Image (cartoon, coloured by chain):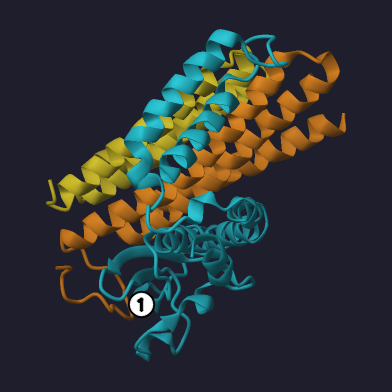
Chain colours: A yellow, B cyan, C orange
């Protein structure tokens, strides 16, 4: 197993751990925080996967994913704050 | 018109960065790529010119500000961020926290300056911007560990939030 | 050889801080302190895992002089910049939303925002 795949495995385990907070709550703001952390970890693991499989396209997908998840977080935050 | 050109040039540079290596023309790009890039940059520049630079202030048109912004991101900002992470690591492991929300006088006049200061505060030791007073541009900052004696004061100067470097004056030179 | 060591060190630092961020989210008492762990630690950790990829691309670029590794390097750096900017702004948005919903910070010694935002 290469070092890149090992890194991705650890990152995936961390995502599962963050999902504990996503399901437990207690408030919806806590769930958004957990979702935000998972998004960051997904972007990081996409970049590492690009090195593992030598696919540059994965990094482009990671950039688009980071921007779209940012817009998603902003809209959920606006909705929670009652401004939408 | 000037803001349209500045925004278009910026988006064209980002386009060139993302498509480098696609062809052999000029070393790195293909002709079709460059043509498509110019057209897309023109459209994006026209749509986004109002958001990207303030038409009354020409801050985005001065190249020295861009150089300073890059220097700020690589130097003081990155070191403050590294310290922030060691600090958070210490708090996570020991669980020793003393949270609170304080008022910080930003002293910034422009929206860009307030945005950069708020983002810098969020990524530096033990502080997180929660809210902003729209009238005075004061920031409300959540601190994970309020130092003794701070909680009785009415407000803090922006300089006191950063530990080693004078980030607010860097930001003032970049954004104002 | 030295490059491999550097890559290994960057991955170790990145994974360590990512793990701290996730444990912080599980451990801290309220949404604001959890945001501290989320924004700082996971952003910094992800920057370091991406830095490992950038170092790898740089090494392969010198070894093979293949243009695709230059592309990998550039795109990774763009992704890092995007990540750093969007995470800080997103954290600010979440904190503001939590405030508007009326969550007050747990165990706070001082709160200058007692009155709800207008």
Residue B35 shown left or right of residue C61 in the figure: left
Q: How many marks?
A: 1
For the residue pair A41 and B31, the one nearer the viewer reads as: B31
> Taking B48 as reference, is A1 left or right?
right
Task: Report the quarter where the C terminus of chain A lies.
Answer: top left
Observer-nearest residue: B89 or B32? B32
* Residue found 17% across the figure and 53% down from its top: A81
Quick check: B116 above or below C105? above
- Outermost residue, right direction? C1
Residue C88 drawn at (x, y percent): 43, 51
Residue placed most toward the observer, B57 or A54: B57
Instruction: Report which quarter residue C104 is drawn in.
Output: bottom left
Kindly identify which residue carries mark 1: B102
Q: Position of residue B60 (x, y in %)?
A: 50, 51
Q: Residue at x 65, y 9 (%)?
A: B23
Question: Circle 1 — which element?
Answer: strand
């Amino acid at each position: 197993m290469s070092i890149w795949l090992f890194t991705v495995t650890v990152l995936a385990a961390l995502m599962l751990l963050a999902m504990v907070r996503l399901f437990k709550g207690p408030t919806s703001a806590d769930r958004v925080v957990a979702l935000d952390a998972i998004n960051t970890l997904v972007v990081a693991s996409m970049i590492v996967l690009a090195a593992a499989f030598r696919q540059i396209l994965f990094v482009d997908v990671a950039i688009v994913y980071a921007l779209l998840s940012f817009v998603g977080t902003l809209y959920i935050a606006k909705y929670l704050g009652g401004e939408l | 018109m000037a803001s349209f050109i500045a925004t278009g040039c910026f988006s064209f540079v980002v386009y060139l960065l993302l498509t480098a290596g696609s062809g052999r023309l000029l070393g790195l790009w293909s002709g079709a790529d460059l043509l498509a890039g110019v057209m897309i940059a023109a459209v994006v520049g026209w749509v986004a010119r109002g958001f990207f630079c303030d038409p009354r202030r020409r801050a985005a048109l001065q190249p020295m500000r861009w150089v300073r912004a890059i220097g700020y991101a690589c130097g003081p900002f990155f070191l403050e961020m590294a310290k922030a992470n060691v600090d958070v690591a210490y708090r996570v492991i020991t669980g020793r926290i003393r949270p609170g929300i304080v008022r910080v006088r930003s002293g910034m006049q422009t929206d860009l300056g307030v945005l950069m200061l708020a983002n810098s505060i969020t990524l530096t030791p033990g502080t997180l911007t929660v809210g902003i007073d729209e009238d005075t541009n004061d920031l409300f900052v959540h601190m994970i560990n309020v130092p003794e004696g701070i909680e009785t004061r009415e407000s803090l100067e922006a300089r006191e939030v950063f530990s080693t470097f004078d980030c607010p004056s860097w930001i003032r030179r970049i954004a104002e | 050889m030295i490059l491999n060591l550097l890559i290994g060190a960057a991955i170790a630092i990145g994974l360590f801080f990512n793990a701290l961020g996730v444990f912080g989210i599980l451990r801290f008492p309220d949404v604001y302190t959890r945001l501290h762990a989320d924004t700082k630690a996971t952003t910094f950790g992800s920057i370091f895992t991406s830095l490992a990829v950038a170092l790898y691309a740089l090494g392969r670029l010198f070894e093979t002089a293949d243009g695709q590794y230059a592309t990998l390097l550039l795109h990774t750096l763009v992704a890092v910049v995007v990540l750093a900017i969007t995470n800080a702004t997103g954290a600010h948005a979440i904190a503001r939303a939590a405030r508007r919903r009326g969550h007050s910070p747990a165990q706070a010694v001082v709160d200058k925002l007692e009155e709800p935002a207008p």
